[in-house]
Amino acid sequence: MIHPHPEASDPEEFIGFNEARRIMWCHEARVRVYQRFEQTSFIGDANVAAVHVDNTTRADRALLVAFDNFGRKAGVDTLYIDDPRQHLDIAPEFDHDFTGMDVVPDSQLDQVISRENGWVVNLRVLREYDPLADRRATQRALFLAHLQDMIRNGDVRGFLFGRGRSDDTDAA
């Protein structure tokens, strides 16, 4: 039988750690979607406004159907999943619902959405995504999430943000 570590018995002990883990999972999902879509022609095709990702029908592939601004089918592609880390899980930051993307009623895209067998990527948002800026923002968010645990435990008493000088004796 595995016994929990005595320090980890309090669920409030690692709130920041759990938040940091959630932040990292979300970052990894965004990066994975961006990298996988770079393998398609959809990112560079200005006619493609949205892509339906059917990640539920087959475990070994994601079936992609592209749609134009009018909700008409504009192309198809398949991304094979050789490793579970390649699975295209929902990244809310790119999802049509969360980004407020307009969908033409009764269009082919609207019909695909109504089947509820996947999710729809808003290509405008995905094209604007900056992986480097996201990585920096995620790094800062992870630090702040861990910091709350460290302050609560007394591991940290003071800190500075920004670029300090190494000869600054008042830094701590």
Image (spheres, helix red, strand yellow):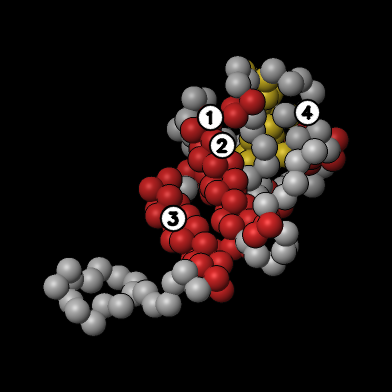
Q: Nearer the viewer, mark 3 or mark 4?
A: 3
Per the rendering, the mark at residue 68 is none
Whole-angstrom CA distance, mark 2 to mark 3, is 19 Å
Q: Residue furthest right?
A: 115
Q: Residue 82 sits in which quadrant?
A: top right
x and y, in percent, of residue 160 in the image: 34, 75
Sequence order check: which comes first, mark 2 or mark 3? 2
x and y, in percent, of residue 37 in the image: 53, 31
x and y, in percent, of residue 144 in the image: 49, 66
Q: Residue 7 sits in which quadrant?
A: bottom right
Q: Residue furthest left?
A: 167
Sequence order check: which comes first, mark 3 or mark 1? 1
Whole-angstrom CA distance, mark 3 to mark 1, is 22 Å
> Do the residues bearing badges 1 and 2 touch, measured as CB atoms within 8 Å?
yes
Per the rendering, the mark at residue 36 is 1
From the image, tell me which residue sits under label 3.
Answer: 139
